[in-house]
Every structure is written in C-alpha cells, then in structure tokens.
Amino acid sequence: MVGVEEQIKNKAAELGFLACGFAQATRLDAQEAPLAAYLKRGAQGKMAYLENHFEMRLDPRLLVPGAKTVISLAYNYYSDEKQVDVTAPKISKYAYGADYHFVVKDKLAALMAYIRSVVGDFDGRAFVDSAPLLERAWAVRAGLGWVGKNGNVINPNVGSFFFLAEIVLSVDFKSDLPFVANHCGNCTRCMDACPTAAIVSPGMVDGKKCVSYFTIELRDEIPTEMKGKFAGWMFGCDICQDVCPWNRRAKPHTEPLFLPNPKLLTMAKDDWANISALIFDEIFRKSAVKRTKYAGLVRNIAFLNS
C-alpha cells in the first residue's frame, strides 16, 4: 500500500514538480552562523529585506505556528530556446515566460487542496520565493539535492534550473533523508566563469557583486567599475548554471506559461536599444521582468551599450 507521503509526491509529479521531499519543521541551528556571517559581510548589498526577520528565517514555526513539516518542491524552468540575435542583450531563462511566483503558487494551492483531501484540514502556508524562509537549506534537508559552489541547489538527475517552493504545515509527515553528499568535487567552472567574481568561496555568492543583483535588485545607478563585466546580460544571469556539468542533464520544461513571447526571442540588439514602454508591456505583461520595471531595463541596456 502506498503511504500518504508517496501519494503526495505522486500528486506533485502530476502537477509538474520535478521533485518533492519532506523534512521536520525545526529550527535551522546550523544555518544561524552562516546567515549572520553573510549579513555581516554586507553581501546582501541594498537588499535590506534580507536583514529582516532573522529568527523567522531560521525557524519555520514562526511563519506557521504549530508547523510540523516542511515540504520542499522543485519546478523546472529550463529552456533550450535561444534569442536569435547573439549580440542582443540577454535575459535569464527563468524570466522567459510568465512570472513564476503566480504559476508555481497555483500549483502549490492545488497540492495543498489534495493534501487536505487525504489527511483532513490543517494549518499551513505555501511559499515561492515569497517569505523569510531558507529555501536551499530546506531543499537539502528534504533530500532534493546539494548546494553547489554557485549557491544553487543541484539535483543529480536534473541539474539546477528549477524554482524552489515550500509548503509549511501542521501535519507530522515522515521525513526524507537529507542530501548529505556534495558532488561538485574539484570542479570550479562556475567560480571561474563568473564575470564579476561574485562567487567568493564555494557556496558563497556575494550578492552585491552578482550581475543579477545589479540588473534586477539594485535601484541606483550601476557602478561604473562594472562596465564591460556583464557579458551582455540585461536581466539576470545564467552563466554559473550554463557552465555547470550537472546541467547537461537538464530537460526543457513542459509548462506552457513559461514559453517566451516570440518577440523576446526575435528582437535584435538595436530593437532592444530602442525599446518603448509599449513594447516592454507587451513582451513582459505577466513576467518577472516587471520587477525591474521599464526604466530599470532601459538603464541596464544603456549600461551594456555605454
């Protein structure tokens, strides 16, 4: 007879999730020192929200009182589609289609409804990069993979091109074994390829040096010393994942909502340099690129062309 945990994993797979694992909802004591060191280093840059809710980040029971389990899930966004003009400014694969926050949140809502149909009512919340929760630590605890040298969770079967999501709930499920191995070995391809040397040590990414930080999170002008170091990226950066040998195992996603607007792939370099607010809204109507706004994308493109 299939146990309830296996039933939930099967339903997660049916909803399109790559992986699903269970971990006991306890305080992440081992993450306290690394988190404090990250903040002390100032690696968060101007992402001040990372400085908030320190204790809550370590203990999911402060997010969901009475929580017993954290279900960690992975949702594929890998795409092998390419922008036609190789000289055009580039956008990270995760932002090709609709905003993942909404797409994956809907999947989580369906999974929570299924869990209620199996175990009855419970207190719980679902998160997609939307709460002070140490997602990577929970993914490792739930057996989804290990944290690679580029700071991404790597699953040995599919690589790292996936979103992480969680359901924190008041049901005491059987935990999976944590992923204790690290299969990066002596490989340093991600560290060597990072154009801004943001990967300062294995698993430690200095956020304020990362191309994604400059092109998405930073609201100020991009520092002039970064000129010529963005390798053509106007929104996000995939370099540290593109060079990772484990991503040879990545398979294109099957999520229709993640398909890019055709114009995104066919716009030439000059088209991007002269993009209007109207075209921006058309291409990125429901996209995560909205985070940087039209003015931010124009700033990024101008910086690449300066």
Image: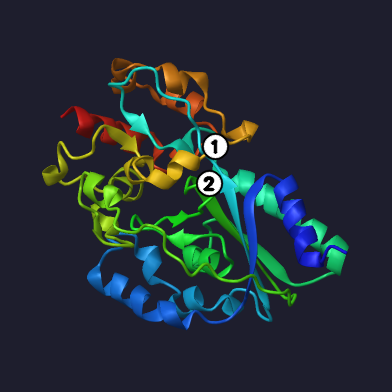
* Viewer-proximal residue among 167 and 285: 167
Residue found 84% across the figure and 62% down from its top: 2
Q: Residues within 10 Å of mark 2 (few under 14, many from 20)?
A: some
Picture coordinates of residue 166, whole percent (x, y): 61, 62
Picture coordinates of residue 46, whole percent (x, y): 29, 59
Residue found 50% across the figure and 33% down from its top: 79
Picture coordinates of residue 207, whole percent (x, y): 30, 57
Lower sequence index among marks 2 and 1: 2
| Residue 184 in sight | yes
Q: Which residue is mark 1?
A: 251
Placement of 219 over or under 269, stated as above or below: below
Quadrant of the rendering where the C terminus is positioned? top left
Q: Amino acid at mark 2?
A: Val
Residue found 55% across the figure and 34% down from its top: 252
Q: Is disc 2 placed on a helix, strand or loop?
A: loop
Q: From mark 2 to mark 1, how far is it between C-alphas?
A: 7 Å
Placement of 229 over or under 191, stated as above or below: above
Residue found 39% across the figure and 17% down from its top: 84
Q: Amino acid at mark 1?
A: Lys
Q: Residues within 10 Å of mark 1 (few under 14, many from 20)?
A: some
Placement of 241 over or under 171, stated as above or below: above
The tag on residue 158 is: 2
Picture coordinates of residue 24, whole percent (x, y): 63, 77
Q: Quadrant of residue 121?
A: bottom right
Tell me if label 2 and label 1 are in contact, CB under 8 Å. yes
